[in-house]
Image: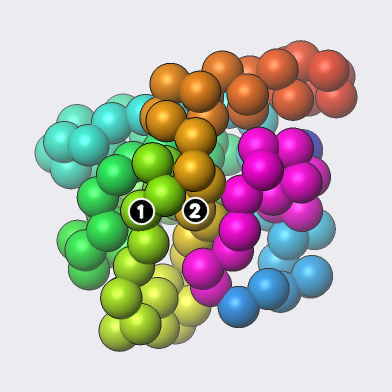
Amino acid sequence: MNVAEIIAGLPAVSLTPPDPELYEAVAVSDGYACDMLSLVMTGVKPGQAWFTILNSMNVVAVAVLADCPLVILTEGVTMEQPVIDRAVAQGVTVLSTQLTTYQACVRLNELLHNSGSV
């Protein structure tokens, strides 16, 4: 499943500028939900979307360190422009959804199973 399909299916909005090439290139096969950065560094795997309510520069740094190309902010959380700019520079796509973390995870799981990605 790619980013464009996730945006449509959750639903979510992209906080980073839409990049159709990147949206197609990033394949998501699973999700990971956590707000403790030290756990994310060892827990999130390549190909997973990271669900969090955290919105600082540290989120971008951990996403890069963990090779996580997609961060999904839940609960309507957004990021300030300098953080978004850093995410873009580091190749991290950031989405935001109004869904709770639980709802967003369940929805991604449904999308993945319905698309045959799992």
On the image, numbered disc 2 is attached to which residue? 96
Q: Tell me the residue that label 1 is attached to.
A: 77
List x then y, in percent, for residue 35. 22, 37
The answer to whether the residues at label 1 and label 2 have Cβ atoms under 8 Å apart is yes
Judge from the rendering whether residue 83 lies leftward or rightward of residue 96; answer left or right.
left
Residue at image coords 49%, 35%: 99
Residue 109 place in picture, x, y as percent: 63, 19
Question: Where are the magenta residues, as a range?
Answer: 3-16
At label 1, the amino acid type is Val
Disc 1 to disc 2, C-alpha distance:
6 Å
Above or below: residue 89 compared with residue 100 = below
- Measured as percent of width and height from the top left, residue 81 is found at 35, 82
For the question of whether residue 90 can be seen, the reply is: no
> Quadrant of residue 117 in the image?
top right
The quarter holding residue 18 reads bottom right
Residue name at image x 22 percent, y 68 percent: 57
Residue 39 lies left or right of residue 30; in this view the side is left
Please tell me whether residue 67 is drawn above or below residue 107 in the rendered image.
Answer: below
